[in-house]
Image: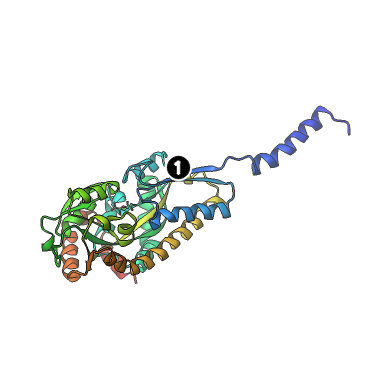
Amino acid sequence: MHITRRTALFGAVALATPFGSAFAADPIKIRISSPAVESDWHARMLTVFKDELAKTAPGEFDIEIHLNATLFKQGTEPAAMERGNLDMAMISAQDIAKIVPAWSVFTAGYLIRDTDHQQKVFRGAIGQEFYKMVSEKMGVHILDVGYLGTRQLDLRGTKKIKTPADLAGVKLRMPGSDAWLFLGKALGASPTPVAFGEIYTALQTGAIDGQDNPLPTDKAAKFYEVTNQIVLTSHLVDAIFLSISEKTWAKLSDAQKAKVQAAAAKAVEWNTTNRLKDEAELVAFFKEKGLEVYAPDVDVFRSTVQKAYLASDFAKDWPAGIVDRVNAVK
Ligand code: KDO
């Protein structure tokens, strides 16, 4: 064939198109930040998310997982996602409530009954309404709800705790936000703000008398090494919301969005299954480590905490009828 300038150019375009679109596109970088420790289930579920995307969308994403709050401090992730400085995080209702006060309803102790209730509330109509607020007011798209576990008290000392009155004067570490601190107060304790990464040392030195977290986290972060008892108050069926910055979300094609959404569902499912199994087995583990593990008068804790929330300033920001609607989800 006689090669003219025109055929040469045509050849170049014909070659450039398939290679340019299908092979040369840079993978989309997704940086995820969390304060979680490496062996905890919600930290590990991020690898499940990454591995799933490597299978369903090979070469399309470059997922970077940053644990132990090395990239962003605990609680600063939502603002970083809003600005587009961070792509993904697992955020709490307490983080969200700082910006969207209606969300404080989900920081209330003894509202969500169990994992099944949590999933039905957030994957149903209530979740849709509340996720929309987060998208509109925070520039964050919630992919799915994850079960962080049921929070229990983990204390130094041997004083038996039966009711909230027994917690008077106990310096209970809580994460540093109003909603968290209120939970500590509602339980009857003196709440003290400490970042997750500093709990171990604060317990060790006696700067705090205790902390609350789900049992799998107490194990993963080794809090049992520096505490003497676990009181099974089950005061908060806690959630983390696997989320992506709206700025990052907007960069994805519809097909990529579907793959990210499916990978998120797979990851949270994996987390929930493992965490529930662990929670059922861990009492024996802590007893073996020499801790006292016992149930207090949970009915008294429940009624005291529920009353405190209903009478709180937080409740003024709750949409009318929301508590009844949440309770009605079966
Ligand atoms: C904590 O600081 O106690 C907490 O459990 C709060 C959660 O919202 C979440 O931030 C969690 O820490 C971290 O992921 C560390 O496990």
Q: Quadrant of the N terminus?
A: top right
* Total count of labels: 1
Observer-nearest of 200 and 2: 200
Q: Residue 33 at what x, y percent from top left?
A: 40, 45
> Disc 1 marks which residue?
247
Which residue is depicted at the point 44% across and 62% down?
A: 269
Q: Residue 120 at what x, y percent from top left?
A: 38, 66
Quarter of the image where one finds residue 172: bottom left
Which residue is depicted at the point 26% across and 54% down?
A: 104
Which residue is depicted at the point 28% across and 58% down?
A: 106
Q: How is the image coloured?
A: rainbow
Which residue is depicted at the point 38% across and 53% down?
A: 132
Is 248 positioned to the left or the right of 222 in the image? right
* Residue 285 drawn above or below residue 23: below
Is 248 positioned to the left or the right of 183 in the image? right
Is 204 positioned to the left or the right of 69 in the image? left
Quarter of the image where one finds residue 163: bottom left
Q: Residue 218 at what x, y percent from top left?
A: 30, 58
User: Which amino acid, by three-letter code, is at mark 1?
Assistant: Lys
Q: Quadrant of the C terminus?
A: bottom left
* Residue 123 drawn above or below residue 67: below
Residue at the far top in the pictured view = 5
Q: Quick check: can you spot residue 68?
A: yes
Observer-nearest of 194 and 290: 290
Is 202 positioned to the left or the right of 2 in the image? left
